[in-house]
Image (cartoon, rainbow, N blue to C red):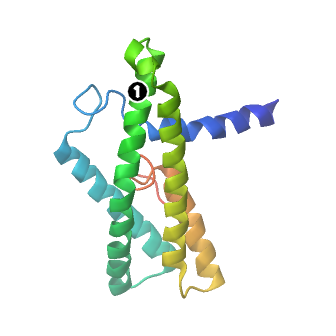
């Protein structure tokens, strides 16, 4: 019973996390563009610091890592935005909005497609960052990326201050 409950929570949590703040752009809980940009910069910095510490990078290597991460984060943003809009549509449908109810299947498909694309991007990120690393550092990289995703790095999921990767 516990395994089924845990499995169902794991399956549903990415859908909930993909939703972002409730209300959507311009609505309740949405970030204005300036705050959103600040949020992304802070999340980027947290990721660079966590990965640099885990991989024991010097300052020059950390700057190079920062530039590599930016490219992936920019590719991730439109995917997350599309998933956010699809989740907003699903919330509207769940609240009884007739127009959104007609789009439920398409919205669910957009969320699932977005998750697939994000997973492929995560694999590509790992492959790019792990080139030339020792097996021990590859393991540290994988664990740190997983920790960032779980704890809420803004490029992977919603950011939270005060959390650090291993």
**Residue lying furthest right in this view?**
1
Residue 24's spot in the image, x, y percent? 31, 31
Instruction: Looking at the picture, tell me which residue is in the foreground, 164 or 121.
Output: 121
Which is more toward the observer, 110 or 128?
A: 110
Please name whichever residue, 115 or 19, is drawn nearer the observer in this view of the structure: 115
Q: Residue furthest left?
A: 34
Residue 33 located left or right of residue 68: left
Residue 161 drawn at (x, y percent): 38, 50
Q: Is residue 121 visible?
A: yes
**Percent x, y of residue 129:** 49, 77
Q: Report the residue at 60% width, 35% height from top.
A: 12
| Crowdedness near tag 1: few (<14), some (14–19) or many (≥20) residues, C-alpha within 10 Å | many
Place of residue 19 in the rendered image (x, y in percent of width and height, measured from the top left): 43, 36
If the image is split into quadrants, where does the C terminus sit? bottom right
Report whether residue 159 is seen. Answer: no
Residue corresponding to mark 1:
89
Q: Quadrant of the N terminus?
A: top right
Q: Nearer the viewer, residue 26 or 90?
A: 90
At 48% from the left and 17% from the top, the residue drawn is 94
> Which quadrant of the view contains residue 75?
bottom left
Q: Quadrant of residue 44?
A: bottom left
Left or right, 102 with respect to 14, comes to: left
**Which residue does the image show at 32% across and 79% down from the upper left?**
63
* In the depicted structure, whether residue 13 falls above or below residue 100: below
- Left or right relative to 64: residue 119: right
Q: Secondary structure at mark 1?
A: helix
Q: Residue at x 55, y 66 (%)?
A: 123
């Amino acid at each position: 019973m516990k395994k089924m409950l845990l499995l169902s929570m794991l399956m549903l949590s990415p859908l909930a996390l993909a939703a972002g703040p409730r209300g959507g752009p311009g609505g309740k809980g949405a970030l204005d563009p300036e705050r959103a940009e600040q949020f992304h910069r802070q999340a980027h910095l947290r990721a660079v610091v966590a990965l640099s510490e885990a991989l024991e990078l010097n300052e020059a290597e950390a700057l190079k890592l920062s530039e590599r991460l930016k490219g992936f984060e920019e590719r991730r943003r439109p995917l997350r935005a599309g998933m956010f809009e699809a989740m907003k549509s699903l919330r509207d449908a769940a609240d009884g909005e007739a127009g959104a109810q007609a789009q439920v299947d398409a919205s669910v498909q957009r969320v699932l497609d977005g998750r697939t694309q994000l997973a492929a991007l995560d694999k590509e990120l790992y492959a790019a960052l792990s080139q030339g690393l020792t097996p021990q550092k590859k393991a540290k990289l994988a664990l740190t990326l997983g920790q960032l995703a779980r704890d809420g790095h803004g490029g992977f999921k919603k950011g939270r201050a005060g959390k650090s990767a291993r």
